[in-house]
Amino acid sequence: MTESLSLHRPEQWPEVLSVAQVASLLSISPSVVRRAITHKQLDGVLVGGQWRIAAPSVWPLVPASIRAHWPEGPWNEWEIEQE
């Protein structure tokens, strides 16, 4: 059994996430995740009929109050890339 992902531990996120993982992280439904992909709010690629989402595109959707606890790390590079 795999350990569930946490917004509070982004250093443990894999580079690529499933729709279910993103939905769980952000406490939203999988259909909202898929809609975010189709509206280009998340970077997703279809692989074998399943969406895979780049972790850097999820980080900006994490509430700012949580992001503030992580002043250093690769997620800062993710934000720079999106600007």
Image: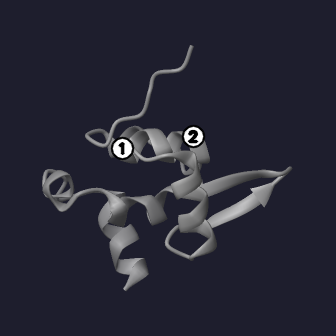
Badge 1 marks a residue whose secondary structure is helix
Q: Residues within 10 Å of mark 2 (few under 14, many from 20)?
A: some
Q: Residue at point 40% right, 42% down?
A: 25
Image position of 8 (left or right of 31): left
> In the figure, 6 relative to 37: above or below?
above
Q: Residue at point 35% right, 62% down?
A: 61
Single out the residue that lies furthest toward the bottom.
83
Q: Residue at point 42% right, 79% down?
A: 81
Q: Nearer the viewer, residue 71 or 41?
A: 41
Identify which amino acid the numbered label 1 is placed on: Glu
Give how far across and how far down residue 80 sits, in percent.
Answer: 34, 78
Return the residue at label 2.
20
Q: Nearer the viewer, residue 24 or 5?
A: 24
Q: Nearer the viewer, residue 14 or 49?
A: 49
Q: Residue at point 41% right, 38% down?
A: 12
Badge 2 marks a residue whose secondary structure is helix
> Disc 2 and disc 1: Cα gap in Å?
19 Å
Return the residue at label 1.
11
Image position of 41 (left or right of 52): left
> In the figure, 2 relative to 76: above or below?
above
Quadrant for the N terminus in the image: top right
Identify which amino acid the numbered label 2 is placed on: Ala
Residue 24 circle label = none
Give how far across and how far down residue 39 sits, in percent.
Answer: 57, 76
Q: How is the image coloured?
A: one colour
Q: Residues within 10 Å of mark 1 (few under 14, many from 20)?
A: some
Q: Determine which quarter of the picture holds residue 76.
A: bottom left
